[in-house]
Amino acid sequence: MSASSTAPRRAYWLKTLHEWHWVSSALCLVGMLLFSITGITLNHAGQIEAKPAVTQRTATLEPALRAQLEKMQPEVLQARKGKAPLPVELQRWASRQWQIETAERDAEWSEDEVYLSLPRPGGDAWMRINLGDGAAEYELTDRGWISYLNDLHKGRNTGAAWRWFIDIFAAAALVFSATGLLILKMHAGNRPFTWPMVGMGLLVPLLLALLLIH
């Protein structure tokens, strides 16, 4: 096939690859910045000091709510092995009292209390209710923005929406990388250092993994 007949096809594919490359790079831009910066902060987590801020609050359940918990307790302990969501009325009470979301979370029920763990990015929280006197405790631990962003990087306690974002971002990053590699291939004839640089990008982490990671 002559050079004159392959030139339009090459130009078409090069244009298409550039379009896919810039679109995927635009989709990945903010995510790349986030994951790159948090990659550095995670790698130096031991050197970055975090001073958790702990907030503690207490309240007393209304008699009707406490009676409802006491009524539910035997069934939860016997039929559900001590784990069940809080009743809807108690979820609403917690939302009004402390502005916390407790729906779709299983609490741990015992003979004398109900304990609900409320993990979150960048911190932790829990709520405990004493079935004897209705005393309720809520504790919130906030470890700051760096810890919050680090947890976003790891997908820790972030929920389904953020996990979907990570999957979509990863797919876009694959498109960005693959189209970049194909563009390099099409320009490699005029850029002699293309493949040595690509090979170095593979060889350096491979040697580090084989020789220096134990």
Image (cartoon, helix red, strand yellow):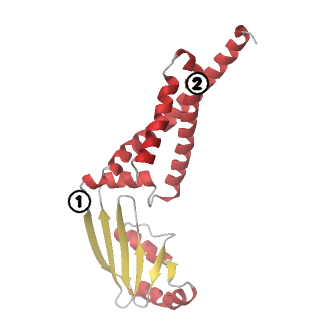
Specify whether 171 is left or right of 91.
Answer: right
> What number of labels is visible?
2
Which quadrant holds the N terminus?
A: top right
Residue lying at 23% horizontally and 55% vertically, measured from the top left? 49
Reading the image, the residue beneath label 1 is: 51
**Foreground tag (2 vs 1):** 2
Q: Say which of 137 and 47 sits in front.
A: 47
Residue 197 in view of the camera: yes
Label 1, residues with CA under 10 Å away: few <14, some 14-19, many ≥20:
few
Q: Are marks 2 and 1 in contact (CB under 8 Å)?
A: no
Reading the image, the residue beneath label 2 is: 185
Question: Residue 152: which disc?
Answer: none
Q: Earlier in the sequence, mark 2 or mark 1?
A: 1
Q: Reply above or below: 151 against 209.
A: below
Extreme-front residue of the structure = 211
Label 1: element kind = loop
Q: Reply above or below: 19 against 173.
A: above
Image quarter of residue 92: bottom left
Which quadrant holds the C terminus?
A: bottom left
Q: Say which of 30 and 194 sits in front.
A: 194
Which kind of residue does numbered mark 1 sit on? Answer: Lys
Q: Say which of 79 and 182 sits in front.
A: 182
Q: Position of residue 127 (x, y in %)?
A: 37, 75
Residue 18 in view of the camera: no
Which kind of residue does numbered mark 2 sit on? Answer: Lys
Q: Position of residue 51 (x, y in %)?
A: 23, 59
> Distance from label 2 to label 1 (Cα)?
49 Å
Specify whether 198 is left or right of 42.
Answer: right
Q: Position of residue 113 (x, y in %)?
A: 40, 86
Label 2: element kind = helix
Residue lying at 59% horizontally and 21% vertically, measured from the top left? 186
Residue lying at 32% horizontally and 77% vertically, measured from the top left? 137
